[in-house]
Image (tube, rainbow, N blue to C red):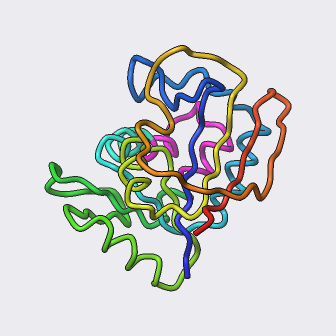
Amino acid sequence: MRKLVLFLHASLDGFVEGSNGAMDIGWVSYDDDLAKHAAQILSTVDTVLWGRGTYQMMFSYWPTVPSAPSSSQHELEHAAWIEQTSKIVFSKTLDTVEWNNSRLVKENVKEEILNLKEQPGKDIVILGSPRFAHHVMGLDLIDEYKITVSPVLIGSGLPLFPGLQEKTNLKLIENKTFDSGAIGLYYQTVR
């Protein structure tokens, strides 16, 4: 059975974006070391799940990378990966999704994800999309949490774990320290 992995960056005080919204992530300690870590995580998945906002943000940027002269090798490689990866967008307000290998799901989130887990293939990742991740956490569908914690306190913003209603037991599988001082945490959900 495929696993559903949540991969997010967080501040030490537990926020996944700053108080200015989804684009307020300049505090993430992203460097070559962390880029290699992200590439390793993404090499284990073949399907990305997003909510509407993250899909629109990613679609406005990544397809432009191959033709941008300033694109780094890492950006070019990630753009090629995301172009070929299956992308499933969960939104009640969108009518269509236009990106290559994208599909729109408007309802039955739990059933759709359970069905995806039963399909053959690599694992599934929620890549960013914290509001959608919060909804999926509430459905108890996340099998692994892969969180990178940046060495910064931002004081306010969108929390990583807002308003949890029930205890979720996790087992630490691995932790890594990066040159930037960021820490990579890898937990499995214990059911």
Q: Residue at x 79, y 39 (%)?
A: 33
The percent position of residue 9, horizontal first and vertical second, equals 60, 37
The percent position of residue 49, horizontal first and vertical second, equals 42, 58
Q: Is 149 included in the stretch rendered in magenta? A: no
Q: Residue at x 80, y 27 (%)?
A: 180
- Which of these two is toward me, 103 or 107? 107
- Which of these two is toward me, 93 or 39? 93
Q: Is 66 included in the stretch rendered in magenta? A: yes
Q: Give the vertical position of 109 relative to 185 (above or below).
A: below
In the rendered view, does 45 fall on the left or right side of 127?
right
Classify residue 104 by image quadrant: bottom left
Q: How many marks?
A: 0
Q: Give the vertical position of 77 relative to 88 (above or below).
A: above
Q: Residue at x 56, y 43 (%)?
A: 8
Q: Quadrant of the C terminus?
A: bottom right
Magenta span: helix, strand or loop, mainly? helix
The percent position of residue 7, horizontal first and vertical second, equals 58, 49
Q: Quadrant of the N terminus?
A: bottom right
In the rendered view, does 34 fall on the left or right side of 104?
right
The percent position of residue 95, horizontal first and vertical second, equals 14, 55
Q: Which residues are magenta?
A: 62-79
Q: Which residue is farthest top?
A: 155
In the rendered view, does 44 fall on the left or right side of 128?
right
Q: Residue at x 43, y 28 (%)?
A: 158
Q: Which residue is farthest front?
A: 166
Classify residue 99 by image quadrant: bottom left
Classify residue 123 by image quadrant: bottom right
In the rendered view, does 120 fall on the left or right side of 139?
right
